[in-house]
Amino acid sequence: MSFYLQPSFFILLAVAVVPAAVLGFAGRRIKYYGFVASLFFLSMLFGRDLQGFLAFLFFVVLAFGVTRWELASWKRGQKSMAKFYVSLAAVIAPLVIYKVGAVFDENLLGFIGISYITFKAVQVVLEIRDGLIKELSAFDYLYFLLFFAPFTSGPIDRSRRFSEDANRTYTAPEYADLLSRGILLLLAGACYQMVFGTICHHFYTPEAFSADHSLLYNMAAAWKDAFAYGFYLFFDFAGYSLMAMGASYCFGIRTPRNFRAPFIAKDVKEFWDRWHMTLSFWLRDFVFMRFVRSATRHKWFKSRLTCACVGYIIDFGLMGVWHGITVDYIVYGFFYGFLLAATDIYQKKCPFHKKHKKDTWYKLVCWAVTINLVMFAMSIFSGQAHIIVAGLIHG
Amino acid sequence: MTEEEIEKRTLELLAEVCDDEVVYEERDIDLFEAGLLDSMAAIEVLVGIEEAFGVEIAPTEVEREEMNSVNKIIHQIVVRALA
C-alpha cells in the first residue's frame, strides 16, 4: 500500500484518527497509540515487500544501537569522538550503499523512506555530538523514526521539536484546533495533488527538438513543458507534504511545512527558502553550517564570500547526488550550487543591484529571471533537458 | 570582554556579512525582512560569532524571532559570553 495515494489508505487513516481524536479531546497523550498506529501503517506499507522490510529493520536496529551507544558516551561525559564518527558512518552507510547500488541496478539495503529516515537519524547523531540532545528516551527515538505520517517522503522533522509535541498534552480546544487544521490540510493537499497536479501533468509532453518545426517553435514548446512540469511537481509534492502535515496534526504532531509559495521568489536563494524547505534547511544546518565552520576555523579561504560560495556548491551538489547518482540529478544539484554562489556574488558586489533592489520594476525583473531559471532547473531534474540534448547530439 | 566590545565586533561582523553599513544605524529592523540576511547568511553570522567570541549557537537552538535584528543578535551573544 502506498501512503496518500490509494483510497484504502485514506479509509484506514480516517479510522485510525478516531482513537487519536478521542485521546486528544480527553487531554491524554497520543504518543503510545500513535506508535502502535505507525507500526500498523508501516506493516501495510511494506506488505509483501519482504526484502524492503528486512532492510528497514536492519536500519532501525543499527541506528538505534549506535545512537544509544553514542548518547551513553556523552551522558557519561566521555564524549568519545571515535564513537561519534562510527555512529555517523553507520547511519549514513545504508543510504550510500543503496544509492551506489542503484547505479548498477542493484537494490542493496534500500527500502521505501530510507532517505527520510536517514536524515532524521543523522540529525540525532549530530545533535548528541553538539550537546543539544542531552536526553532522548528509547521510545521517543523510535517514535520519531517510525512515525508514519511523514515516513515515506517527509517533511523532515527534528527530534527535539517532535518529542516536545509527542510528550505534550493538549487541552480540548487546542486539540480541536489542531484536528480541524489537520483535516483541512489533508483536503487541501489532496486537492493540490489530485486536481491541480493532474491538470499540470496533462500539459507535460516532453520531446526532442523536431526538424519539422522552427527553432523558435521548438524552444517555446520546451519552455511550456518545463513550466508544466514545474507546476506539476509543485502541486504533487506540496500536496503530498500538506497531507503528511495534516495527518501528523491529527496525531498531535505539528510536522513543519515544506513549501511557502516558492514561485514568487525574487532570487534562487529565496526560492530554496520556500521550496522543499525541510530538506534545504536540513542541508543548511548540518552540511553548509559545518562546512563554513570548519573552513573558518582552519582559514581555508581568504574571504567570507568565497567560503560561502564554495559552501553553496558543496551543499547543493550533495543535494543533487542525494536525489540519485545520475547525470541529470548531479547536473541539477551543481547547477543550483553555482547559481546560488553567482547570486551571492552578484548581490554583494554589484552596485546596480544595491542601487535598485528596492525598486518595483527591478523586483519584477528579478522575479521573471528567477522563475525562468527555476523552471530551467526543473527541465534538468525531470530529464526533459536530457531528451533535448540527446536529440540534438544524435540528430 | 565588555559589552561595548561585543557590540563593536558584532556590528563589524554584521556589516561584512550583510554587506551594508546600514546595520550601524538601523538596529531594530528585521534583518530578514529587510533583505539584509537570508537563512544561509544567518549561518555565516553564527560561525562568525563563534570565531569572534567563542560562543557556540546552533542554528536550531534559537528561534529566528529571537535573533532577527542587530540588537537581538548582540543580546544573544552578551547573555552567553558574559554569563
Image: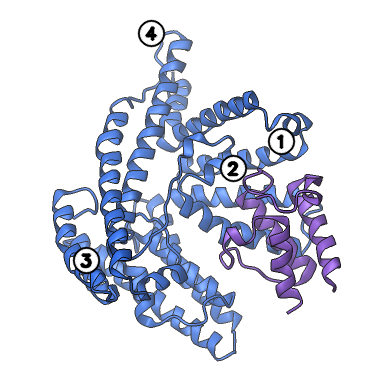
Chain colours: A blue, B purple
Which amino acid type corresponds to the residue marked 2 in the rendered image?
Lys
Which amino acid type corresponds to the residue marked 4 in the rendered image?
Asp
Q: Position of residue A252 (x, y in %)?
A: 32, 66
Q: Are marks 4 and 2 on the same chain?
A: yes
Which tag, 3 or 2, sits closer to the chain's start? 3
Q: So how many labels did they put on this image?
A: 4
Circle 3 sits on which residue? Answer: A21
Identify the secondary structure beneath mark 1. helix
The residues bearing labels 3 and 4 have C-alpha atoms spaced at a distance of 61 Å
Depth check, mark 3 against mark 4: the one in front is 3
Kindly identify which numbered label has been placed on residue A212.
4
The residues bearing labels 1 and 4 have C-alpha atoms spaced at a distance of 40 Å
Depth check, mark 3 against mark 2: the one in front is 3
Identify the secondary structure beneath mark 2. helix
The residues bearing labels 3 and 2 have C-alpha atoms spaced at a distance of 40 Å
Badge 1: few (under 14), some or many (20 or more) residues near its Cα, within 10 Å?
some
- CB-based contact (under 8 Å), mark 1 and mark 2: no
Which tag, 1 or 4, sits closer to the chain's start? 4
Identify the secondary structure beneath mark 3. helix
Which residue occupies the foreground of this view, A151 or A164? Answer: A164
Q: Position of residue A72 (x, y in %)?
A: 49, 87
Q: Residue at x 50, y 34 (%)?
A: A264
Q: Quadrant of the N terminus of chain A?
A: bottom left
| A173 left or right of A104 in image | left
- CB-based contact (under 8 Å), mark 1 and mark 4: no
| A286 left or right of A209 in image | right
The chain to which mark 3 is attached is A
Depth check, mark 4 against mark 2: the one in front is 2
Kindly identify which numbered label has been placed on residue A269.
2
Which amino acid type corresponds to the residue marked 1 in the rendered image?
Tyr
